[in-house]
Image (tube, grey):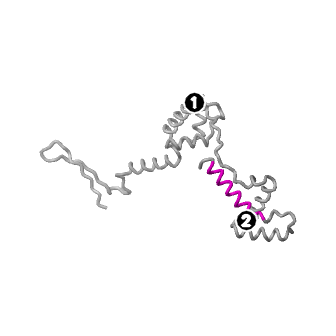
């Protein structure tokens, strides 16, 4: 959503919240009556009493602006090293060399080889970038399963289930290869 749409949505949501708690804001109201109205409003609007308490408190402390939902913009700071592309190339190479190598081990190797200062690379960041490169744990597992399945193509559980033999073809120097599986 664009900023105008977000602002409009926040104002609409704040108005809905205000309408839920408007009758509870009367300072002269008896606490028993307020409790009864709060329970009715919670049931009518499908929210908990605790939510209504939070709305009331926000309104009393911050006014109408306190009822607006918080904006959820990403505020992630990019603190990656300048040579992060080179670091990721090395990480991908290390993972391909030994697929069972963990992210922490890769980071340790990169730090020992001088690609990054100790403590700069975070496992979660490295894991995310390795996953994006197709080297995540699940992706590697799928790759290993496919590889294992393809290498077992002609395997059988018992001896003599699969027979393979070569014999010369009559009048030719070519050999005929046959496979026989009866069971």
Which stretch did the figure color magenta? 4-22
Q: Select label 2 or label 1 by which is in front.
A: 2
Along the horizontal axis of the image, is 127 left or right of 28? left
Seen from the viewer's position, the closer of residues 79 and 70 is 70
Q: Looking at the picture, does residue 148 appear above or below residue 15?
A: above
Q: Residue at x 63, y 51 (%)?
A: 6
Q: Which element carries disc 2, helix, strand or loop? A: loop
Seen from the viewer's position, the closer of residues 98 and 15 is 15
Magenta span includes 89: no
Q: Residue at x 65, y 32 (%)?
A: 118
Q: Residue at x 52, y 45 (%)?
A: 136
The mark that comes first in sequence, 2 or 1, is 2
Q: Residues within 10 Å of mark 1 (few under 14, many from 20)?
A: few
Give the percent coordinates (x, y) of residue 160: 32, 56
Give the percent coordinates (x, y) of residue 58: 78, 55
Question: Which numbered disc covers residue 48?
Answer: 2
The residue that label 1 is drawn on is: 83
**In terms of secondary structure, what is the magenta stretch mainly?**
helix
């Amino acid at each position: 959503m664009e900023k105008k749409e977000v602002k409009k949505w926040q104002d609409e949501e704040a108005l809905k919240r205000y309408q839920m708690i408007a009758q509870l804001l009367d300072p002269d109201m008896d606490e028993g009556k307020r409790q009864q109205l709060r329970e009715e409003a919670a049931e009518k609007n499908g929210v908990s009493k605790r939510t209504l308490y939070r709305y009331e408190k926000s309104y009393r402390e911050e006014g109408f602006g306190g009822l607006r939902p918080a904006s959820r913009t990403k505020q992630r700071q990019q603190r990656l090293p300048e040579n992060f592309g080179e670091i990721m190339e090395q990480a991908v190479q290390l993972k391909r060399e030994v697929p069972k190598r963990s992210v922490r081990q890769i980071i340790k190797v990169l730090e020992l080889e001088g690609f990054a200062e100790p403590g700069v690379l975070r496992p979660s960041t490295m894991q995310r970038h390795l996953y994006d490169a197709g080297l995540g744990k699940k992706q590697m597992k799928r790759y290993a399963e496919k590889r294992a399945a393809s290498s077992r193509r002609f395997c059988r559980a018992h001896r003599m289930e699969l027979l393979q033999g070569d014999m010369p073809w009559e009048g030719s120097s070519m050999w005929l290869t046959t496979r026989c599986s009866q069971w």
